[in-house]
Amino acid sequence: MTFEYAPAPESRAIVTIKPKYGHFIGGKFVACSKHFPTINPATEEVLSQIALAGKADVDAAVKAARKAYTTTWSKMSGKERGKYLYRIARIMQERAREFAVLETLDNGKPIRESRDTDIPLAAAHFFYHAGWADKLEYAGLGTSPKPLGVAGQIIPWNFPLLMLAWKVAPALAAGNTVVLKPAESTPLTALLFAEVCQQAELPAGVVNIVTGDGSTGALIVNHPGIDKIAFTGSTEVGKIIARAVAPTNKSVTLELGGKAANIVFDDAPIDETVEGIVNGIFFNQGHVCCAGSRLLLQENVAEEVLHKLKNRMEKIRVGDPMDKNTDVGAINSKEQLAKIIELVAVGDAEGAERWSPACNLPSKGFWFAPTIFTGVTQAHRIAREEIFGPVLSVLTFRTPQEAIEKANNTPFGLSAGIWSEKGSRTLWASQQLRAGVIWANTFNKFDPTSPFGGYKESGWGREGGRHGLAAYLKGVSHE
Amino acid sequence: MSFYGLVDGSDASLKSYLGNLSGVDQVGAEARAAMLATRSIKTTSKRWAIDTAITMVDLTTLEGADTPGKVKALCTKAVRPDPTDSTVPSVGAVCVYNDMVAVARTHLDLIGGQHVPVAAVSTAFPSGRASMPVKIQDTQDAIDAGAAEIDMVIDRGAFLAGRYIDVFNEIVQIREVCGDKAHLKVIFETGELVTYDNVRKASFLAMAAGADFIKTSTGKVAPAATPPVVLVMLEAVRDFYEMTQVRIGVKPAGGIRNTKDAIKQLVLVNETVGPDWLNPKLFRIGASALLNDLLMQRMKMDDGYYTSPQYVTMD
């Protein structure tokens, strides 16, 4: 007897995708002469034509943001700003299914994740920051904290709407206005968010959304009319931005790459640890900057954990992201797939042992089977470089001290995981690890109240919580 | 007895065996069960799951007010759950108190239900508070009356007091009484053991002591067969199979009242131990109200509309 799950596709009828989009500037959609396609990475179907912002578009967006900042938003009481944020949060919840379907179509992530994680968390960020809007004086950030002005925000393609929420909600709560650029490959939920701003009757120009590629991002970063740059993306681009803003007065926060150690001690709760390993690296196809991409196993349990991990990976359902039973969806783009394939080839060449469960990958679209490399050491490139895909490097250690040394021996420091049933060991390890977020007996859990950000090359500043709020206020420490 | 070479029957060996089990993280176990509860089972797979679930139901009546008439009615329903549709399979077993076993067995044989076994709850069910000779006699009576399955309860008091060897020895003795005449299901009453660590420990203890099935609850205590409890037991069964190559069955009982809940249980089985366990020989659901909901969902799939409860038999 076998229990085959019949297809359970989510309907896409709930979303209306226009054939062509403009920019959202000054509260209106503005036509643009240049366009580029956005596709569904699971099928390669062209979903829409997206406006490519040039200098004039970015100028217009910054101008609209400045005007809204000066005339309306910075003058409005926190209580009134909070009302708008609450309204946006409620509309996002009401239209959650629409957002989820659109996110999955444009990004390739499973509908289960966009429905159960991305969209609810995005709404939660607006609710959380709505609450702060009229309480900024009581946030411990000075008696009269002031907004910075116009924030230029550039977000990645891995959690399109959630990253928008991380950026827009604190900026608006603190009294800033924004010019936001969604990622080239995933602009659609940001454009739907623009409609939500209209529906919430947010004053024109408070949120401006310009779409485009890296060149549009550079225009925002270098724009003299912008007071703050907030970027989430690769360390490579983060360094370019850091150089660009260094000689200016711009504030900056950067959320960059990671190569998180997920450390399993021999007293770990094994079954839940295996779940945590799977969730740590295969959640969102491994397109997660804080993914647990380096698994550090205590040698005396390594064999058992790997055996159970492989059995568990056999159960991962890879395929149609719109199917409600899919666990791992499509790789976001052809370019990203090529990058994953390249680094996996490096792993092979370096002599690490590659393993994937048998899975039938669709013929169209961009796919990569969940993969683990065993026999990896610190000297392997796949133990040092961010793969940003469903590929796990497995290393071993002998003592807790060795685990910490290996975990910290990386240019990154965004997140880490500790698996142990022994509280004292967990607390000790969490104090030794040089990473911004440390999970104990769980992984990839997010909450708007909790600050998120990295050490070393993983970034500057924090997002979320009180710390994240500080990054959008004048005269307060950004750490 | 061999105890699969895992323990030698001494207190020390049992302590060492149970002491080597890894812990269960409560948050993680509950999150995994909640995630599996989101599986969307539709169309052909739903139909398959409903029929499979029917064959797994241990149709149960365990009331002080049980009479021969009530038990006979239950037996009739067990053999032909839907008298209007002969494609509906019989349930897994009929589960009754010790003194109703003969009534049930005789009636089942009379109405063409020879293939439906009778399960008897035993060992001073549901509390387990009696002396060992009484528990042994209780079990022997049920087997003599025709029970092919014995659902015994463990001594939770002994377990919680840390006297694991006493719990172990009781199971071993009841196992001996069952011999090859009856399958032994061991009930933990997980609502009284409370922690998942205890559930895992009890599972490994009972399996080594000779249980054929491990069962969550008596149905008299809530919470009972919650998805995370069943998940932890299925993981134990899976690990035990890897250690011994012996397949132990699992029986959630209590609180599974509708088709959706039953299908969630089947998903847990499928994605934890795998399809080998999707079989009434290795998975049962202790229930009474569940059967009618399965029948109504089955009718809905055939007819396209929800029927009134008037169209399914009350017992």
Image (cartoon, coloured by chain):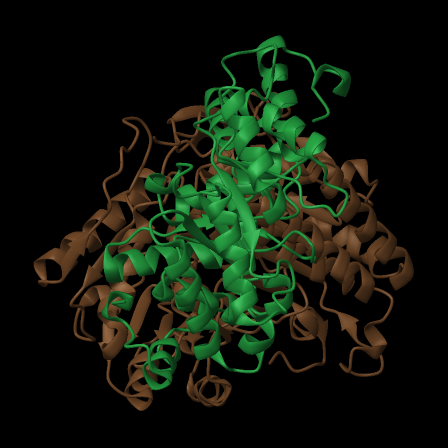
Identify which residue is drawn at 43% across, 28% down.
B115
| In this picture, residue A450 sits left or right of residue B10 | right
Identify which residue is drawn at 63% across, 16% down.
B300
Q: Nearer the viewer, residue A281 or A148?
A: A281
Residue A173 lies in quadrant: bottom right
Identify which residue is drawn at 55% across, 57% down.
B138
Identify whether A118 is placed above or below A454: above
Q: Nearer the viewer, residue A118 or A402?
A: A402
State the hue of chain A: brown
Identify whether B312 is placed above or below A187: above
Identify whether A190 is placed above or below B240: above
Q: Nearer the viewer, residue A452 or B178?
A: B178
Looking at the image, can residue B51 be seen? Answer: yes
**Which image quarter holds the C terminus of chain A?**
bottom right
Q: Position of residue A132 (x, y in %)?
A: 80, 66
Q: Position of residue A291 (x, y in %)?
A: 41, 61
State the hue of chain B: green
Q: Nearer the viewer, residue A136 or B267?
A: B267
Identify whether B156 is placed above or below B16: above
Q: Position of residue B283 (x, y in %)?
A: 44, 43
